[in-house]
Image: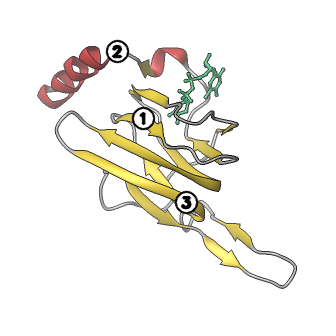
Amino acid sequence: MKLLKSRAPTLIDFTEVPSESGNLWFAEVDQQLPFLVKRVYYIVEVPAGAERGAHAHKKLDQLIIAIKGSFVVDITDGVNNWSFIMQGPDKALFLPAGGWRTLRGFSEGSVCLVLASECYEADDYIRDYEEFLKWKSKEIEA
Ligand code: T46
């Protein structure tokens, strides 16, 4: 797997194979992907003004790709803040566990593809921001 220099949110480049009959993009575990993908999901038809996310994960790492259209991903670890404008299939946002994330500003017809390091586990979610801050402070102390 690709070793990342830090566990901070960061953009990863996918590789393009352009041709006259369309463009293909790929990423492989030994080159760009920082984890083995165990689950894939996608979010479509988000109404104008709607937001997704507003939670954190304790263990789950993810890659988020704007396969079509655009949207914004805001992340905080309780101290540092990041904001990424995702647009197009050339880049994936590595979103490590431990960050509170909100997805907003979806353009009409946009498609958000997510590659996840783990299968779905409801217990891995922290959906209350105050609880998230308490969990982060315990994590820093540990
Ligand atoms: C994330 C952002 C970017 C499942 O049953 N299986 C799944 O794999 C997923 C992802 C969700 N669900 C169920 C759980 C809820 O009943 O689908 C429903 C909607 O999920 P949620 O409210 O978590 O959706 P988002 O868009 O707010 O968050 C999702 C991911 O859950 C989350 O991990 O980081 O997309």
Residue at image x 12%, y 26%? 141
Tag 1's secondary structure? strand
Tag 3's secondary structure? strand
Q: What is the C-alpha distance between the residues marked 2 and 3?
A: 29 Å
Labels 1 & 3 near each other (Cβ < 8 A): no
Labels 2 & 1 near each other (Cβ < 8 A): no
Task: Find out if the beta carbon at label 3 lies less than 8 Å from the nearest ligand 1 atom.
Answer: no
The answer to which of marks 2 and 1 sits earlier in the sequence is 1
Residue at image x 55%, y 40%? 117
Identify which amino acid the numbered label 1 is placed on: Thr
Q: Mark 2 = which residue?
A: 128
Measured as percent of width and height from the top left, residue 27 is found at 63, 64
Q: Mark 3 = which residue?
A: 87
Measured as percent of width and height from the top left, residue 2 is found at 48, 62
**Which tag is nearer the camera, tag 2 or tag 3?**
3
Drawn side of residue 44 relative to residue 65, left or right: right
| Total number of numbered discs in the rendering | 3
Q: What is the C-alpha distance between the residues marked 1 and 3?
A: 16 Å
What colour scheme was applied to this rendering of the protein? secondary structure
Measured as percent of width and height from the top left, residue 112 is found at 62, 45
Image vertical order of residue 25 relative to residue 21, above or below: above
Which quadrant of the structure image shows residue 99? top left
Looking at the image, can residue 33 be seen? no
Which quadrant of the structure image shows residue 37? top right
Identify which amino acid the numbered label 2 is placed on: Asp
Residue 3: which numbered mark, if any? none
Image vertical order of residue 112 relative to residue 14, above or below: above
Q: Mark 1 = which residue?
A: 102
User: How many other residues sit within 10 Å of disc 3, few (<14), some (14-19) or many (≥20)?
Assistant: some
Q: Which of the pair 81/49 is nearer the observer?
A: 49
Looking at the image, can residue 4 be seen? yes
Q: What is the C-alpha distance between the residues marked 2 and 1?
A: 13 Å
